[in-house]
Amino acid sequence: MRIISLLPSGTEIIYALGLGNYLVGRSHECDYPKEVQQLPICSQPKYRSDGNSAEINKAVKTILELSLSIYKVDVEKIKALKPTHILTQSQCEVCAVSTDELQEALNEYLKDSSIKIIDSNPSTLEKVLKNIQEVANATGIPERGKSLVNQMNNSFKKIHTKTKNLSNKPTVADIEWIEPILVGGHWMMELIEMAGGTNCFPDEKKRWLKFENIIEKNPDKIFIAPCGFSIQRTLQEMYFLENRSEWNTLKAVRNMEIYVCDGNNYFNRPGPRLVESLEILAEIFHPEIFPSQHHFIGWTKRLRIANIKKDE
């Protein structure tokens, strides 16, 4: 086999299934495990990804309004790599190269080859696990898929067993993008519940919010994990929230219950590390039960600091 993965979660699934040696190409976002970074890059964004969240949002919207793809597929490089399998997704046109974009870019090449396109489109934990099994089946190792799915399921259940009957479940806001504000959806709804939290924004259809919505709900805890952002990068953008006059009135701010998480490595990738993502949430929501394993790696606490300026 010669596998190209055009989405980070797909790359992580390939490695978790023990197929890392068969991976010959990756997307520009595939960065875990470290050894994958040595592989040829087969896609690039058409916008500057080093801007702040407001700038990235504006650039992406502009491209989409023109009905254009926001990613460029390196067709010649893919042909040169001669893949037998390509992993991509049809879930989000912003997150990674979509299946439709790939098929349009490769067009005749796909028609004249026997390449298997493995599409990822999970919206729940059950579908994440189903997708992992589909990758295992498509690559001829169904038993490894079953083993990995069972391991993940057992890890989820182990934590949920400890939290499901708790009476002190904090209200939680999960911020997945800072400017404008987007709250988490899909499998994040389930992870919050399994970790022993009560989601303030459980409506999948109403994820783009105004700051006033956060004020209205006044959650016990806020965790911030922008898609594709490291902890440090998110800390650099906290001024979007902290410069707002009402930020310091929030209960979570007053009680120092603001958590900045690694949204690049956890939460936003529907693959094996959703287990660690659940562990992080459990540590944040119920430190009296769950010892800190991921502090400073997957999350850090943001202490209350008033009147933060962008250049400080």
Image (cartoon, rainbow, N blue to C red):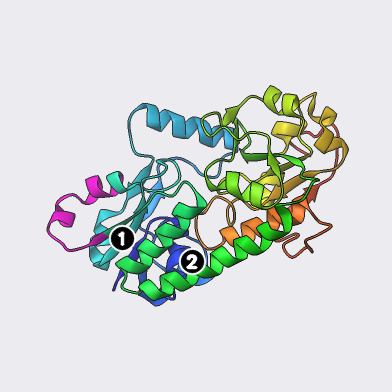
* Towards the viewer: 63 or 155: 155
Task: Please identify the quadrant where the N terminus is shown.
Answer: bottom left
Residue located at (57% from left, 61% from top): 273
The kind of secondary structure element at disc 2 is helix
In the image: residue 67, left or right of residue 126: left
Q: Which mark is residue 149?
A: 2
Q: CA gap, disc 1 to disc 2?
A: 21 Å
Q: Which mark is residue 86?
A: 1
Quadrant in which residue 6 is drawn: bottom left
The crowding category of the residue bearing disc 2, from other C-alpha atoms within 10 Å (few below 14, some 14 to 19, many at least 20), is many
Magenta part of the protein: which range? 101-116
Is residue 298 something one can see in this rendering? no
In the image: residue 185, left or right of residue 256: left
Residue 96, how many percent across, how many down? Answer: 42, 48
Quadrant in which residue 218 is drawn: top right
Task: Please identify the quadrant where the C terminus is shown.
Answer: top right
